[in-house]
Image (cartoon, grey):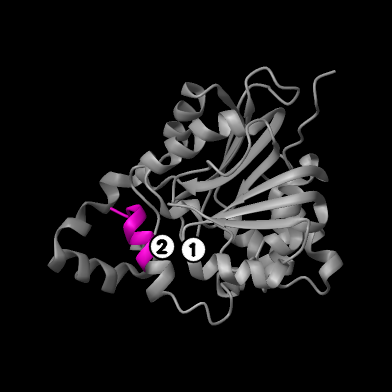
């Protein structure tokens, strides 16, 4: 299990951070291409806004793009190393970064957050941490606030990874199946369905969930967008399976110019029915 303690040790002591985490954007080319070609089209309905909360910013890979989209951004991370890096990089009146225990949002005032965001961070936490964050976000979000969390869906494939419990078999499978047997740090205790259930139990409502592949054919990840029940954004949950997320990344990487990134991703998204749109209720 990838406990809070495991995550703290890994991101504080074992991960090098030599490139500020930008290596994770390599399939898209770089963080800027990933932001404008992949993330921006998925979340632009909710930006710009006043108050943003970012959970698990690392060294600020997404913070640099979120900050111009709000009046104030507050980030929380469980590692002192990341908090120090973000404070050094984004120090100013419009930005604050706090170290937490990997679960708590006590430093955030209730009913103050218009957009809660986390991408490529909470995929590494177990369902108890997801549940704790959702419970707190139900109080921290404004009545029309929105949460966008990227989390694991690996639990949907638990049976396919039975070999991980047998060391000898695990090594043989890895040798023959390569990336198709890698978990990429995702957790088995989280699925899209479990996330939807946890949100509902805390008075939040998922309005879309996009199941995506991550360096494999399996839909091991999910981008869930949710809002308080009764908010202007509230609508029936739309669940989409997108097995072409990495093909989209390749198209963005190969786009001739930065301005072409979102356009390059459109063909793969068109095959899925186009980008989700989120009209507010009157």
As helix, strand or loop, the secondary structure at mark 1 comes to loop
Marks 1 and 2: in contact by CB < 8 Å?
A: yes
Mark 2–mark 1 distance (CA, rounded to whole Å): 8 Å
* Quadrant showing the C terminus: top right
x then y, percent, for residue 29: 67, 74
- At a point 47% along the width and 37% down the height, the residue shown is 192
- At a point 48% along the width and 52% down the height, the residue shown is 100
- Figure quadrant of residue 182: bottom left
Along the horizontal axis of the image, is 139 left or right of 123?
right
x then y, percent, for residue 49: 81, 42
Q: Say which residue label 2 marks.
A: 184
Q: How many marks?
A: 2
> Which of the pair 42/229 is nearer the observer?
229
x then y, percent, for residue 37: 74, 60
Magenta residues, start to end: 1-9
- At a point 17% along the width and 56% down the height, the residue shown is 165
- Figure quadrant of residue 205: top right
Q: Say which residue label 1 marks.
A: 215
As helix, strand or loop, the secondary structure at mark 2 comes to loop
């Amino acid at each position: 299990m990838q406990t809070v303690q495991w995550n703290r040790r890994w991101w504080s002591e074992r991960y090098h951070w030599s490139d500020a985490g930008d290596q994770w954007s390599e399939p898209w080319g770089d963080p800027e291409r990933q932001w404008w070609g992949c993330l921006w089209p998925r979340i632009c309905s909710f930006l710009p806004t006043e108050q943003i909360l970012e959970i698990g910013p690392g060294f600020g890979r997404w913070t640099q793009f979120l900050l111009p989209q709000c009046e104030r951004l507050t980030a929380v991370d469980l590692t002192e190393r990341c908090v120090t890096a973000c404070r050094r990089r984004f120090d100013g009146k419009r930005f604050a970064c706090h170290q937490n225990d990997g679960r708590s949002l006590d430093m955030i005032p209730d009913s103050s957050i218009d957009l809660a965001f986390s991408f490529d961070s909470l995929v590494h936490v177990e369902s108890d941490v997801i549940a704790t964050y959702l419970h707190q976000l139900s109080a921290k979000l404004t009545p029309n606030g929105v949460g966008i969390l990227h989390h694991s869906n690996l639990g949907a494939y638990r049976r396919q990874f039975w070999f991980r419990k047998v060391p000898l078999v695990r090594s043989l499978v890895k040798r023959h199946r390569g990336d198709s047997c890698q978990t990429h740090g995702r957790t088995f205790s989280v699925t899209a369905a479990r996330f939807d259930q946890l949100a509902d139990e805390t008075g939040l409502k998922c309005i879309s969930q996009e199941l995506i592949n991550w360096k494999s054919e399996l839909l091991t990840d999910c981008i869930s967008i949710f809002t308080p029940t009764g908010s202007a954004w509230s609508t029936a949950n739309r669940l989409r399976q997108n097995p072409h997320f990495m093909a989209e990344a390749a198209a963005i990487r190969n786009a001739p110019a930065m301005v072409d990134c979102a356009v390059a991703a459109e063909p793969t998204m068109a095959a899925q029915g186009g980008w989700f749109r989120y009209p507010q209720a009157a």
